[in-house]
Image (cartoon, helix red, strand yellow):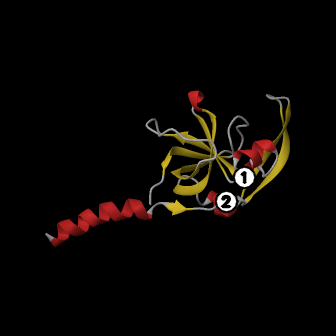
Amino acid sequence: MIRLTIIFLFFIVTPAMSQTGISWNTLDDVQFSEKYSEEAQGYYYYPNFGSTVKALEGKQVYLEGYMLVIDPGEGIYILSRYPYASCFFCGSGGPESIVELKLLPDHPKFKMDQRITMLGTLELNYDDIYQCNYILKDARVYKR
């Protein structure tokens, strides 16, 4: 009976321990270089991720920020360090201050500038100019 209890606790506790809380300061570990894109015929910032961020790639992380509902019909949602009026798209902050969310299909409706904590698998985007540099895959609301 004790052995069964230990095995049961292992399967409950292990997934919870594998989630890492990160802050926006963590995502600051990136430098950008401007390069020309033939495809888009323009200059874009390409990331050079630091070791702290690279160590989180592929890991389950949670992050608190402001929800930016960009195009719900197309499934485009962004988690931002700043509210919409001050976000990266409006001139404040850099590309490291936003995270693209690839939400699970059963996600709730969100409000613009809703303060929320999201959980997902961190993906680093090195060169696709049509996506954010940081992406949370299988993103969902994180409940502590």
Say if mark 2 contacts mark 1, CB within 8 Å. Answer: yes
Q: Amino acid at mark 2?
A: Trp
* Of the image marks 2 and 1, the number of the one nearer the N terminus: 2
Residue at x 54%, y 62% (from the top left corner): 21
In the rendered image, the quadrant that contains the N terminus is bottom left
Looking at the image, residue 138 sits to the left or right of residue 79; the answer is left
Q: Secondary structure at mark 1?
A: helix
Mark 2 → mark 1, Cα distance in angstroms: 8 Å
Q: Which mark is residue 88?
A: none
Mark 2 neighbour class, 10 Å CA radius: few under 14, some 14 to 19, many 20 or more: some
Q: Report which quarter residue 101 is drawn in.
A: top right
Q: Report which quarter residue 34 is drawn in.
A: top right
Check disc 2 and report the residue beneath it.
Answer: 24
Check disc 1 and report the residue beneath it.
Answer: 96
x, y percent for residue 88: 76, 46
x, y percent for residue 49: 71, 55
Q: Amino acid at mark 1?
A: Glu
Q: Secondary structure at mark 2?
A: helix
Figure label count:
2
Residue at x 21%, y 67% (from the top left corner): 5
In the rendered image, the quadrant that contains the C terminus is bottom left
x, y percent for residue 39: 79, 28
